[in-house]
Image (cartoon, grey):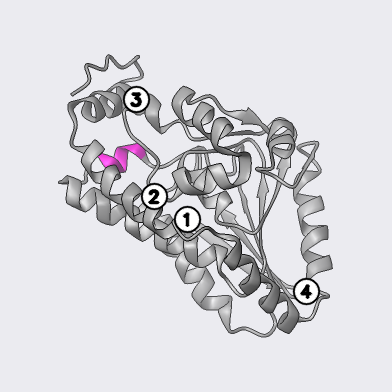
């Protein structure tokens, strides 16, 4: 059974993340997102992509239990690289991708959202990268995209404290485009998608291509380094403690090794 379902209508492909209870971002879900992109990339009846979560959340984080099945730091680096590749594909995709975020976009969920071109959020949504709380670091380019949106100082605060910000704060800091009451966010996202679908696909693709040049030259080097360190940190004793504490629902005790 898949975790992502989508339907195409009015030039819009709407994908729904359906992995209760938290829509956690697993490796299988990332592969399904990649398959969604494959399915619509050359479909002339699809001009805009829209992704949202079913239930209480957009995506409340990566699948931590899946991490316990990864046998080595090298495999953990490969896991990061696979996610990075898909989210980079999203950001450079020839058709606009809108994330409609309610409830929470945390960890891998926020990294997925940051791979989209536009983010509409509910005012009360929680957005953050809490990986350090588990003795880990972001692995899907979150450490590189977050500073681009919110600036170095705010990104440092969010990463190091693990504290999320609200949807309203995300708009103020540039992480999201607009915030709405929770019951309106998907409707507003759909309205934007309909508006973008009226544009010329030729000029839209050109505009997205041009936006890619705004990335600094060091971006890819930073992404590569993130994947490398993702694997190195994973094999630390602190990471084992953090993951174990999360699963056991207790506070971790980190010792710096």
Q: Residue at x 19, y 45 (%)?
A: 73
Of the image marks 4 and 3, the number of the one nearer the N terminus: 4
Q: CA distance from mark 4 to mark 3?
A: 43 Å
For the residues labelled 1 and 4, the Cα–Cα distance comes to: 23 Å
Q: Quadrant of the C terminus?
A: top left
| Tag 4 residue | 10
- Residue under circle 3? 246
Q: Earlier in the sequence, mark 1 or mark 4?
A: 1
Tag in front: 1 or 4: 4
- In x, y percent, where is residue 133? 39, 25
Mark 4 or mark 2: name the one nearer the start of the chain: 4
Q: State the quadrant of the N terminus.
A: bottom left
The residue at the point 73 percent across, 72 percent down is 9
Select label 4 or label 3 by which is in front: 3
Distance Cα–Cα, label 3 vs label 1: 23 Å
User: Is the residue 166 above or below the residue 220 in the image?
Assistant: above
Q: Are dots 3 and 2 in contact, CB under 8 Å?
A: no
Residue for badge 1: 3
Residue underneath mark 2: 26
* Residue sitting at the far left: 71
Q: Which residues are magenta?
A: 64-68
State the residue in front, 212 or 101: 212
């Amino acid at each position: 059974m898949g975790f992502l379902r989508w339907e195409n209508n009015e030039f819009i492909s709407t994908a729904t993340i359906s992995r209760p209870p938290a829509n956690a971002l697993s490796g299988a879900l990332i592969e399904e997102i990649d398959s969604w992109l494959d399915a619509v990339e050359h479909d002339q009846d699809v001009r805009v992509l829209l992704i949202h979560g079913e239930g209480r959340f957009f995506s409340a984080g990566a699948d931590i239990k899946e991490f316990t099945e990864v046998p080595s730091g090298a495999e953990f680096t490969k896991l990061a690289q696979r996610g990075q590749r898909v989210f980079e594909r999203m950001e450079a995709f020839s058709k606009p991708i809108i994330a409609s975020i309610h409830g929470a976009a945390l960890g891998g969920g926020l990294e997925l959202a940051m791979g989209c071109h536009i983010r509409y959020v509910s005012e009360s949504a929680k957005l953050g990268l809490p990986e350090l709380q588990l003795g880990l670091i972001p692995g899907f380019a979150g450490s590189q995209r977050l500073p681009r949106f919110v600036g170095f100082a705010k990104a440092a605060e969010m990463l190091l404290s693990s504290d999320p910000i609200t949807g309203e704060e995300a708009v103020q800091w540039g992480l999201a485009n607009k915030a709405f009451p929770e019951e309106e966010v998907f409707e507003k996202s759909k309205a934007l998608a309909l508006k973008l679908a009226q544009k010329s696909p030729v000029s839209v693709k050109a505009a997205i291509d041009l936006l890619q040049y705004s990335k600094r030259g060091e971006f890819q080097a930073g992404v590569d380094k993130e994947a490398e360190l993702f694997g190195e940190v994973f094999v630390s004793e602190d990471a084992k403690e953090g993951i174990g504490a999360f699963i056991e629902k207790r506070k971790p005790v980190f010792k710096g090794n």
